[in-house]
Amino acid sequence: MTDDTHDEGEALELDHVEWQQDDDGTEWFVHEGWRYELDDDGYAYAVSEVSETDEASPPSATDGDDASAGEGSVQVLDATTAIPPVRRPASAEIREPAPATAPAPDDGSSPLLRLSGVRSGYGPLPVLHGVDLDVHEGKTAVLFGLNGAGKTTTAMNVCGALPTWEGSIEFDGQDVTKWNTKRCVDAGIVMVPEGRRVFPELSVERNLQVGSWSQRKDGDWVASQREQVLDYFPRLRERLVQLAGTLSGGEQQMLAIARGLMAKPKLLIVDEASMGLAPVIVKDVFEIVRAINADGVTVLLIEQNVGALDVADLGVVMSQGRIVKTLSGAELTDRSVVSKLLMG
Ligand code: ATP
């Protein structure tokens, strides 16, 4: 952008915008649906419109790192001549970029899962714009974000279901960036998908058997794991012969988690376990997750329900394909921080 694209007489003065800064030093804010970036001349120019329409538009050659993902799609326009520039008030406070990764635990151990600068999307549509995330062994991390923030897309990258365009994913000391789903499951990355997706025509027992497919050669382990899983979920023990499709929503969620546990996860990713469940059932599910974690399984919950903070060692908030906040320790007790971030 050059400073001859505007007439200084047209410049707006805005005091109440929230200035932010990208890792590369770009200062920006969103005003009336436009992303403005500060240029060297002290004026901010509208560079991209953040559209919330459902109609996906392919990214333009100019969007690169700076494309902001709206809920449905992103439209990137060069609007430097259409919208007056904005002068940054000298008093404006700039929000520093959020720390991308959680602080390492005191023991200095390396994380079980590490995402570094992960970019990914669907077809030509970028969704993740450089995700950094560390999850340490034995911990429960919760990835929060509104619909369309990119949570599931992140999880799909981790479990090999969606290609990573740039960046890297390390798991248990190995670079798994290019691994397929089977290899990821064999290594211990197991995802319980959003919407439960149990096999409705199969009994509870058969669903558990399907879950243990990758471990089928170790019959003793499968038998003892089945007992362990049914101890976590006594309601399933009572319903072993019932068709999964006839279970209640809460029971289906429990079965989905139980089926995931039968695949011997080191890392269990549970996508929106709380969705559509009554609060009392959600509490039960989170308590069971706590027990699973206490027994040594590292957990990554994907949630919009701030109640998940009760079982979290780490809270991570995602917005528009980026991690915008990480919370640990005492910060996790204040639900209002996450609620506020989720409400924008
Ligand atoms: P939710 O809480 O609603 O599940 P999320 O944070 O998990 O949201 P994602 O499912 O990762 O969000 O979706 C992020 C963006 O990617 C959305 O804009 C969505 O429309 C888009 N998207 C997701 N799946 C596909 C797909 N298969 N093809 C094209 N775009 C997709």
Image (cartoon, rainbow, N blue to C red):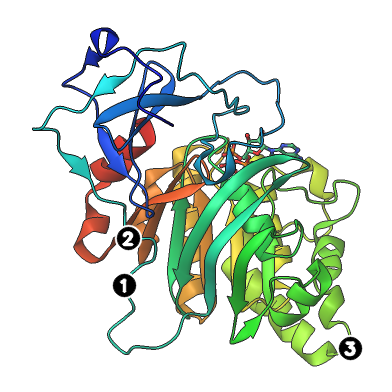
Q: Residues within 10 Å of mark 2 (few under 14, many from 20)?
A: some
Helix, strand or loop status at disc 3: loop
Label 3 and label 1: CA atoms lie apart by 39 Å
Q: Residue at x 61, y 55 (%)?
A: 119
- Judging by the rendered image, the residue that carries numbered circle 2 is 99
- Judging by the rendered image, the residue that carries numbered circle 3 is 217
Which amino acid, mark 2? Pro
- Mark 3 or mark 2, earlier in chain: 2
Q: Nearer the viewer, residue 177 or 31?
A: 31
Does any atom of ligand 1 lie closer than 8 Å to the CB of label 3?
Answer: no
- Image x and y of residue 15, in percent: 16, 21
Q: Residue at x 54, y 67 (%)?
A: 115
* Residue sticking out furthest to the top: 9
Which amino acid, mark 3? Lys
Q: Quadrant of ligand 1?
A: top right
* Relative to 107, 2 lies left or right: right
- Judging by the rendered image, the residue that carries numbered circle 1 is 103
- The answer to whether 168 is drawn above or below residue 62 in the figure is below
- Mark 3 or mark 1, earlier in chain: 1
